[in-house]
Amino acid sequence: MCNHHTIPTQFDNARAEAFAYKMMSTLNAGATALMLSIGHRTGLFDTLAKLDPSTSQQIAEAAGLHERYVREWLNAMVAGQIVVYDKETGCYHLPTEHAAFLTREASPDNIAVTAQYLPVLGSVEDKIIECFRNGGGVPYSEYPRFHEVMAEESAQTTVAGLFDNILPLVDGLTDRLREGIDVVDIGCGRGWAVNEMAQKFPHSRFRGYDLSDEAIAFAREQARTLGLDNAVFEVRDLTRWDEVDAYDLVTGFDVIHDQGRPDLVLRAIRKALRDDGVFLMQDIAGSSEVQNNIDHPFGPFIYTISCLHCMTVSLAQGGLGLGAAWGEELAEQMLRESGFEQIDKSFLEHDIQNAYFVCRKKAAQKTKAA
């Protein structure tokens, strides 16, 4: 039961003013984030990074865009202290230190990629409000750009570190992939990770499963373009997945918490693995307890993307609706309840958003001391 005695009885003017300033800063930051997304999608950040200080007309011509829109965007970037403006010359400039976090060449550090989530999530606000009133959820089909943005984000966090950082988390895995094993990536989206691995390890056999027809069509076309005969993609509802002893490696990159029934999916993963197989799971780094996430660098963002996507797409399937902030504690609990006996958790320096779990069906046998 909540303790009402901890609520202050007198109005604190200083506290109120500080909060009002925080709200103003929030509005400005939100507006700036929307313009970051536009700057990325139009290529304006990439254009600015290659130009000397230039007028809005020069920048618009270099980017192939209309000057009046470019000028208003530039002024928003100046007000947001992203772009520098010289009133004497009327020229705009993107400092090198800012470009290092805003251009395609800056990947995997391009924060403008992540900013795209905000307008995508905002596009379903009306439908989410209906869910607040009536329950239920918003299905994947209502997010027309989500897979596109997710694929670009995944290219930065997952694919960029796949061979040097992520796969080496499993001892000996790279060598096994070179020799040839059976791999499935669940919730594969547009298939970037699968197709990258299939190119790198031609002797291994890869499959990708996802609920989205659009994402699978994109993955198949990419595999065809790359001439890959060891990468197969299939539209599949993972809650009805029933393969036995079929894979040496199952990967799930930022996908388990989105499932309607993560519990059923985790059990299916264990069942699909061979005895010496490994489940490599990437999911959101954070706690299952909200008080532990107050100082999380992405705390508000995680709960927002959860409410407007992760949680609601699960509820739309009649699922558990765990959301993106299900937390490492619950993740480990559900992995153990699904039958995984050995779970090793790691974090990567280049990826502050995610935790990585290496899961095995049986715990490693300890060698007795001589």
Image (cartoon, helix red, strand yellow):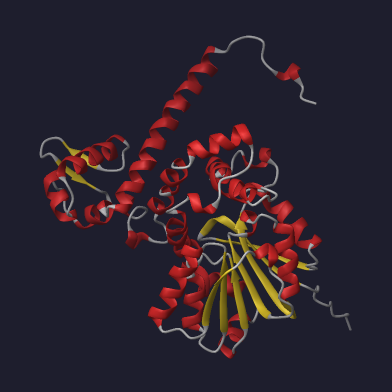
The image quadrant that residue 31 belongs to is top left
Of residue 185 and residue 292, the one placed in the foreground of this image is 185
**Is any atom of residue 297 visible in this view?**
no
Q: Position of residue 191 (x, y in %)?
A: 49, 70
Image quarter of the C terminus: bottom right
- Position above or below: 83 against 215: above
Task: From the viewer's perspective, tell me whether residue 154 is left or right of residue 354.
Answer: left
Vertical arrangement, residue 181 with respect to residue 30, above or below: below
The image position of residue 194, as x and y in percent, is 52, 74
In front of the other: 154 or 269: 269
Q: Is residue 287 left or right of residue 267?
A: left
**Quadrant of the snapshot with the N terminus:** top right
Would you say 214 lies left or right of 7 here?
A: left
Give how far across and how far down residue 219 sits, in percent. Answer: 46, 71
Q: Is residue 3 above or below residue 337?
A: above
Quarter of the view holding residue 369: bottom right
Determine which quarter of the picture holds residue 343.
Answer: bottom right
